[in-house]
Image: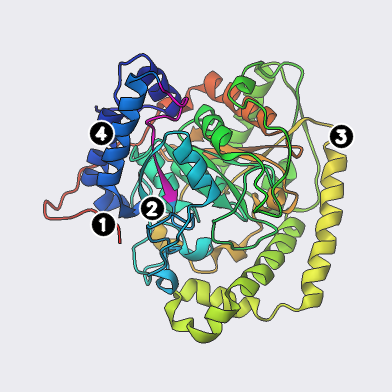
Amino acid sequence: MDAIPSIAEAAALIAARKLSPVELTEACLARVARHDGTINAFIRLTAERARAEAKAAEAAIMAGKTRGRLHGIPVAHKDIYCTAGLATTAHSKVLIDHVPTADATVVRRLAEAGTVMLGKLATHEFAWGSPSFDLPWPPARNPWDPARFTGGSSSGTAAAVAAGFILGGPGSDTGGSIRGPAHYCGIAGHKPTYGLVPRTGILPLAYSLDHAGPLAWTVEDCAILLQAMAGHDPADPASAAVPIPDFHAGLQGGLKGLRIGLVRHFHERDNPVSAEVAGALEAAMAVFAELGAETRDVVLPPLADFHACGMLILMAEAYAAHEPWLKTRPQDYGAAVRGRLYLSALISAADYIQAQRRRRELCAQVAAAMGEVDLLVAAVMPTAAPLIESVGKFASFEQPSFTYPFNVTGMPALALRCGFTATGLPLGMQIAGRPFTDALVLRAGHSYEKATGWASRRPRLASLTDAGATSGAQAAR
């Protein structure tokens, strides 16, 4: 199998008995073996487990016991998702020998949906650092150009999807860690409404900002994954007990009559973007108009306010989570996270409380602005993927982030490709909506994706030039 299909395409082929889960899994494993020595998406490959699960899925499907669109679909998990009996390290020496006794809720739900697990994926250390070279495993690299950054912290998941090693997988997003990698790696990534997907069994970074959500090749695939991931879990105190719609069915209906607002000042004044990103956003708004939406500009509070508020909350909550280890094992952290945690120790209780107060004000101001529109469009990143060597350990502190507004407010936000640079690197945009309008956000993204055809363009992976090179993945501990 030369081309790896999307989840929706694979599900249709499997249902028609034109594709075997075993064949699909072997194709993914072959791509891992051939290319992951360059990409470094996996830190732990569970090939034999995947083969056994694929055979079981095939047997069940042949017996008429299909579990739905995800049955037989290869996935893998960011290494902050706990996996029973399989090391979950957060890509850190601190947890190098941590083997959970239970699966994270999302891991369990995806397994119950019939997915095939290929292993554990690279992340920034504890889902916060930067591309670091002083950790037990190397950072993941961008399949469009391995010299370039994947974004973080769901770096391995985005790289694995873009490279065709897996068809999708769950990531986490505290300040943009699903959407940034989706932008840089040219895939789709959805940060759901806060509380829609439970975080039980996911190693925390900042509890009041952490979101779990899907990354996949298309928006449709994200909807399919979200269906299995979403739903109340009483073990997560922030989990929302709300009805779960049919996200896949909700993709239909188009955009006619929807009011879509571009937050222009974010990328023109608050954090100016490259000409290519600005042009792609303008072109996307034109497509929305052609599809029948009413488009306009929308003004929100300054981007720097969201960034300062979100960053301060993140730092305070991250320090609270890591204080015992930082005091007893500081040498086991990489330099990037250790430096960030030392800086976080300087934040006072008064600082944190004032940030939470400002957060409530920002949420109220955004809610008022949403009275004018149904959806918002914004940039994800100011440029295409930079060179990985150019990304410093405090890079995320340097400019206000386009993604923080939707962590601070807890609103659903989808990142999807909206063009390419002249050199062939992908560009993305965000679509955001009111809390718990995830189905509408996905519908808008799907409509745009179908109208533009950007999803037909995949990276061309180069074979390893060193015949003696081995995969960056390690066998299960």
Q: Residue 63 location, x and y as percent?
A: 34, 20
Question: Residue 365 versus residue 19: which sits nearer the camera?
Answer: 19
Label 3, label 2: how far apart the Cα atoms are: 42 Å
Magenta span of residues: 65-77
Q: Is residue 69 magenta?
A: yes
Q: Residues within 10 Å of mark 1 (few under 14, many from 20)?
A: few
Disc number placed over residue 475 in the picture, else none? 1
Label 2, label 1: how far apart the Cα atoms are: 10 Å
Query: For the residue labelled by badge 3, is the local secondary structure a helix, a strand or a loop?
Result: loop
User: For mark 3, what is the residue?
Assistant: 371
Q: Residues within 10 Å of mark 4 (few under 14, many from 20)?
A: some
Question: Residue 331 versus residue 183: which sits nearer the camera?
Answer: 331
Label 3, label 1: how far apart the Cα atoms are: 52 Å
Query: For the residue labelled by badge 1, is the local secondary structure a helix, a strand or a loop?
Result: loop
User: Which residue is rendered at x = 46% and y = 25% of the image?
Assistant: 69
Q: Residue 394 location, x and y as percent?
A: 55, 68
Q: Amino acid at mark 1?
A: Ala
Q: Amino acid at mark 3?
A: Gly
User: For mark 4, what is the residue?
Assistant: 27
User: For mark 2, what is the residue?
Assistant: 120
